[in-house]
Image: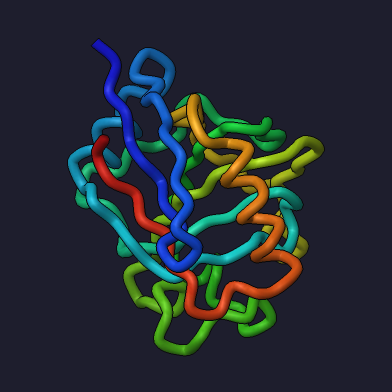
Amino acid sequence: MSRYITITLDKRGVSCRARLLEDEAPRTCRAVWDALPQSGAAYHAKYARNEIYTLVPPLPEPKPGRENPTVTPIPGDVCYFGFEPWEIGNPAYGYDADSEAHSDRGATDLAIFYGRNNLLINGDAGWVPGNVFATIEEGLDTMAEAAQDMWLRGVEGETMTYARA
């Protein structure tokens, strides 16, 4: 029996539904599922192209490690990234000083990809593989429109929530 999550842009009132890829990424699915719900400020990726994400506190131990990784996510991919504090604290990334990006514990990045031609590379760190742990099965088009609106009109005040469906 498949398990599902909902991903919501709270201010815009837009949600999508994603199926967990428990065969491909069992440790990541378990870690994320056990930590839900999670919510935080929403961002539009600066480097990856068609990505929106939130940063939340690190997931409880044990960390899932690398599984089902990609550096070229496709539309509908939902990815997990575990970051150490030094990896995302650069002021050039634009995070507020009180955001999870500046936590001395590091941060978890939960992201969705809504369009093609993504490449997970960062000028400071190089390749940034993400664990693909879910696939969006409902609401991708609506979420893509909202994500494009975030890119064009800004992310201020938007939050992104991941919850069990």
Left/right placement of residue 62 relative to residue 119 reads left
The x, y position of residue 67, in whole percent, is: 45, 27
Identity of the residue furthest to the right in this view: 117
The x, y position of residue 113, in whole percent, is: 62, 42
Q: Quadrant of the N terminus?
A: top left
Q: Is residue 81 visible?
A: yes
Nearest to the observer: residue 52 or residue 124:
52
Nearest to the observer: residue 87 or residue 71:
71
Q: Give the residue displayed 34% in from the left and 19% down from the top.
A: 22
Q: Give the residue displayed 48% in from the left and 52% down from the top.
A: 14
Q: Quadrant of residue 108?
A: bottom left
Q: Quadrant of the C terminus?
A: top left
Left/right placement of residue 59 relative to residue 160 reads left
Reply above or below: 149 against 79.
Answer: below
Q: Is residue 83 visible?
A: no
Color encoding of the figure: rainbow
Left/right placement of residue 33 relative to residue 75 reads left
Reply above or below: 117 against 99.
Answer: above
Nearest to the observer: residue 34 or residue 106:
34
What is the count of numbered marks? 0
Q: Quadrant of residue 118?
A: top right
Left/right placement of residue 37 relative to residue 85 reads left
Identity of the residue furthest to the bottom in this view: 97
Q: Give the residue displayed 52% in from the left and 56% down from the top.
A: 53
Nearest to the observer: residue 159 or residue 56:
159
The x, y position of residue 79, in whole percent, is: 50, 40
Reply above or below: 142 against 9.
Answer: above
